[in-house]
Image: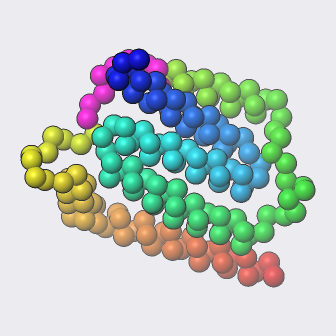
Amino acid sequence: MEYGLLYQVIFYLFGLIAVASAVAFVTRKSPVAAALWLVNTMFCLAALYIMMNAQFVGAIQVLVYAGAIMVVFLFVVMLLNLGHPARVSDIKGLAVRLVAGLAGLALLAELFVIGRQKLPALLPELPPGSNVITPIAVPLFREYLLAFEITSVLLLAAIIGAVVLAKRKG
């Protein structure tokens, strides 16, 4: 098997697993099971970023989203104490399953259409001796610093809100 064909098969495989994991995420009734499917989706997206030669974005995907955000999400779920696990079922009705299946097929069709086109590089060509972090870090900490800080304050407010809600129940 040729290297380019193998690369393409692996790329589509990660895409298919990401779409299937996302469909499993939205069809789970248990928030913990949904969070685990979302982590799987995040790892597949990180693998896709790495395959598109955006190693820094892939590493940040794993560290920030699959790591930190999902840990915060699970802590919020645990603090809210959503009920006894026996009452929470992952089985949904037939209509929800059909809608989720159709959405998954639509995403898969988009993946094949996009895959047939020539995709642009995620990062511009860098001169020799430069790194891949600078083109991302400079705009992030110059033009988008306020949005970056507001996002961190919103996440902190969400955590504090979850703690307040959890204490109010007790």
- Inspect the magenta stretch and tell me whether residue 162 lies in it: no
Q: Residue at x 35, y 63 (%)?
A: 147
User: Please, is residue 119 above or below residue 88 in the view?
Assistant: above
Q: Quick check: can you spot residue 114?
A: no
* Residue 65 relative to residue 139: left or right: right
User: Please, is residue 87 above or below residue 166 in the view?
Assistant: above
- Inspect the magenta stretch and tell me whether residue 114 lies in it: yes
Q: Position of residue 105 (x, y in %)?
A: 60, 23
Q: Residue furthest front?
A: 1
Q: Residue at x 54, y 25 (%)?
A: 108
Q: Residue at x 65, y 64 (%)?
A: 74
Q: Quick check: can you spot residue 39?
A: yes
* Residue 46 relative to residue 141: left or right: right
The colour style of the image is rainbow
Total marks in image = 0
Q: Quadrant of the C terminus?
A: bottom right
Q: Position of residue 120 (x, y in %)?
A: 26, 31
Q: Image quadrant of residue 50?
A: top left
Q: Quadrant of the N terminus?
A: top left
Q: Position of residue 99 (x, y in %)?
A: 70, 29
Q: Position of residue 94 (x, y in %)?
A: 82, 29
Name the foreground residue: 103 vs 33: 33
User: Please, is residue 34 above or below residue 97 in the view?
Assistant: below
Q: Which residues are magenta?
A: 111-121
Q: Image quadrant of residue 163?
A: bottom right
Q: Residue at x 72, y 68 (%)?
A: 78
